[in-house]
Image: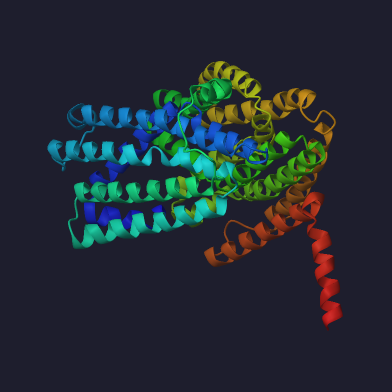
Amino acid sequence: MGLVFIPLYIHFMGIEAYGLMGVFATLLALFGLLDMGLSSTLNREMARLAVQDDKAQEMRDLVRTLEIPYWAVGLLISLIVIAASQFIAYHWVNAENLAPRTVQTAIILMGFVTLFQWPIGFYSGGLRGLQRQVLLNTINMAMATFRGLGAVLVLWLVSPTVEAFFSWQIIVSVIQVGLIVFFLWRSLPHAASPPRFRQELLRNIWRFAAGMTGIALLSTILGQLDKVILSRMLNLEFFGYYTLASSIAMNLYSFISPVFSATYPRLTNLVALGATEEITRLYHKSAQLVSVLVLPAALVVALFSKEVLLLWTQSSVTAEHTHVLVSILIMSIAINGLMNIPYALQLAFGWTRLTFLVNVMSVLLMVPLMIVFTKWYGAVGAASVSVILNAGYIFVSLPIMHRRLLPTEKWRWYLEDVGRPLLAAVVISIIGRFIIKSDWSPLLLIVSLGLVSGGTLFASACAADQLEVVARIKSFMILRRQIS
């Protein structure tokens, strides 16, 4: 929805007003660190308590106990944004066509949007923990449509101003958080007493919440540190190419995040039940699903990055300067994505220390490596550092994890969950690379890349034994013969 409506936002408000949406996104990302791990904690606790007897009262009390400080933090953030609106408008944002007073009004409205948008992540964590993802996705899809289409109508029929845009965002955020709150409380099991604040529940979860806070802080640093360093070391043009390549690679998380969101609460359920065999089965099936979704897409984009960029940007200069960066960064994200299910397993067991310590080491290594590699090899060297660090997760962090969790399953993860789908994807994508030529017509390139992508995905899925693609195909063929 964001991609669809962006051109219309710019058409009605102008590029400077649209740029304020970037300011809003930056503020939300920075203040996201104040989540304090409560969203992930609620996710885990709802999943853990849902499979235990006589926990209805505790579940409802926990939501009430955590939502009070969460709303308090949201109110604090809102007040900070409003109080800082004059400074941001007059000393941070460099607007040429928008009056500072207009910018300040928009920032104040952002503060009110934040107040109601901030708790959405918290209550969404509760619904995910209860495995109500379909309900949550339905709400989010409906509200995304309502938010985008409504904003366009307001800008078109009411007022084509940034103030009107953010006023509409306030209305939609109030409705969205209201719906999610309503359905979360409705999804919780009934209890004899009304929910109440219980301080002792905070003592039970503070270690996990603190660990998640540390991980979130370090992950934010790792995610932004390269851009901070490169913005200083590279000229603006080459930094722009790096930013574009990074944005393309990050889209790979569209395949990773849904699997993680669905797997993590179910693993937590099974850990609470002590169902080791089912934990092992779900762990491998989910890991193979991530491999099948991520590896074919990453390999095709990495091997055909120049063609993809030419088709998308229609700029040979951009494609020439960016395609190598795209190839390196998307493989880095793919390697990182493979570790999402092992990470979900750690969280399901309430073990945050390993990821925290690994991220600390990554931050300490990233700074000198990024500086040295950028001096030697420019933006390509900087991109290579992320591959090195993410490979460390695969070859260092994973073996350490399996010494404690599912100790007999390490080699099965390497060989079956990742190795087989990877080998199948590599074979098909390399064959496609030898056949397809860059000077083919755009239409022929699109069709060819589509065939290679489909073939790579199919081969990788067939190699994943836990997904049973081959068995399902055989069953379908037998059924067809019986019908005919």
- Place of residue 153 in the rendered image (x, y in percent of width and height, measured from the top left): 26, 61
Q: Quadrant of the N terminus?
A: bottom left
Could you say which quadrant of the image residue 469 lies in? Answer: bottom right
Residue 415 is situated, as x and y percent measured from the top left of the image, at 82, 39
Q: Quadrant of the C terminus?
A: bottom right
Q: How is the image coloured?
A: rainbow
Please state which of residues 143 and 289 is positioned toward the viewer in this rendering: 143
Where is residue 9, by image quadrant?
bottom left
Would residue 186 be found to the left or right of residue 270 on screen? Answer: left
Q: Residue at x 74, y 48 (%)?
A: 426
178, 92: nearer the viewer: 178
State the residue in front, 278 or 303. Answer: 278
**Which residue reaches farthest front?**
192
Q: Residue at x 58, y 26 (%)?
A: 385
Looking at this rendering, what residue extends furthest in the bottom direction?
A: 484
For residue 106, above or below residue 230: below
In the image, residue 448 sits, relative to residue 356, either above or below, namely below
Find residue 43 and report its image quarter: top right
x and y percentages locating residue 48 in the rendered image: 64, 36
Residue sitting at 58 percent across and 66 percent down?
444
Q: Nearer the viewer, residue 283 or 126?
A: 126
> How many callouts does the rendering have?
0
Q: Is residue 214 visible?
A: no
Does residue 92 show up? yes
Which residue lies at the image location 51% right of the left edge and 32% below the top edge?
62
